[in-house]
Amino acid sequence: MADYKRFCIAILAILMLLILLPEAQAEIRVCPKDCGNSSIQDALNASLPNETIAVESGTYREDIFVGRPVTMRGVDTGEGRPLLVPKKGRLILAARGATLRGFEISGPENLDYGNCTIEVVLPANIYLNDFAGSKSVCPDVPASWNSSYAINYQFNSRVMRSRLGNYWADYTGEDENADGIGDEPKVIDDVNIDYYPLMQPAEDYRISGEREIEMELIRAKVNVPFTISLPANPTTAYEWNADYDYYLLNLTSSQFERMPTRAIGAGGTSVFVFTPLRPGKTTIHFVYKRSWENIVADTRTIHVEITV
């Protein structure tokens, strides 16, 4: 009986410990000013395992030690990808499972003297970054240099899906199918290989969530229709296609209104009328393309807040 009681007390203690542990935040934000954190290292020190450190556009001149399995994600807020410039040392990835994505990595200034900017001490995930060359990284262990899953991306107006690696300024491979990914892998050393090297800097690949831009917001009411008008020219065979939440919105009508001119091939406006069905927040995505092509000429994203 005594053993049973001790077992119950141990279980209760573990449960209380789990309850008292701080909950992981969805995301810790870092920016040059006015967002609470201006230092990446301070954000890392305050983070919990598996949290995300979202670093906004700016130049960060600090040495960084990643000692927890977190995700460091660069976010382009309209001024380019965040630039990491370690003052004197390096960015050291010393946590198994840490992720580094979405950054421009500076230097080192001289790649011929064995200097490097990023040191990988434990296996990490590193992709969608811009590097001066393979000599700017010094992995002590095998790491993953491309995404572990396929990503939808737009490159040179073509929409494709693939795993994606990093951009290496010294990569000399070809891209025969023009998908933006090198045909040959980028070899860092015998056990560190980027199998999906990018042909252009990562900012040339349009990926949802990699860049934050101001989007139009419509405040609507239930059962009160609202209109969205987009410039169009059906004589080119391009047309707008709307992707929306059928639970919150009903597409009441869509039609093309030609400009008041007799000119052949003149464009006009595609008019979409939506009727909100119930309160909530949603997003309408518009894609402008020909029906037989996988080439996108334009996209629009509109947020909708519906109240009673």
Image: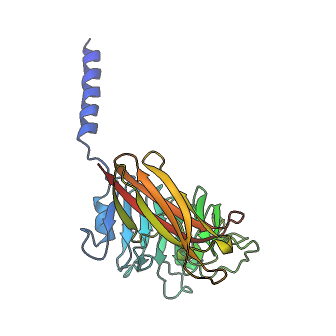
Q: Position of residue 166 (x, y in %)?
A: 57, 71
Above or below, 262 relative to 255: below
Dividing the picture into quarters, in which one does residue 305 lie? bottom left
Above or below, 39 relative to 273: below
Q: Position of residue 89 (x, y in %)?
A: 40, 78
Taking depth in this image into account, of 291 and 138 the one nearest to the observer is: 291
Taking depth in this image into account, of 48 and 149 the one nearest to the observer is: 149
At 32% from the left and 65% from the top, the residue drawn is: 29
Q: Look at the image and tell me whether residue 188 can be seen.
A: no
At 51% from the left and 56% from the top, the residue drawn is: 253
Q: Residue furthest top?
A: 1
Q: Position of residue 295 (x, y in %)?
A: 66, 69
Q: Is residue 257 left or right of residue 195?
A: left
Q: Position of residue 203 (x, y in %)?
A: 52, 75
Q: State the colouring used for the structure image.
A: rainbow
Dividing the picture into quarters, in which one does residue 204 lie? bottom right
**Quadrant in which the N terminus appears:** top left
Q: Is residue 154 left or right of residue 80?
A: right
At 48% from the left and 47% from the top, the residue drawn is: 246
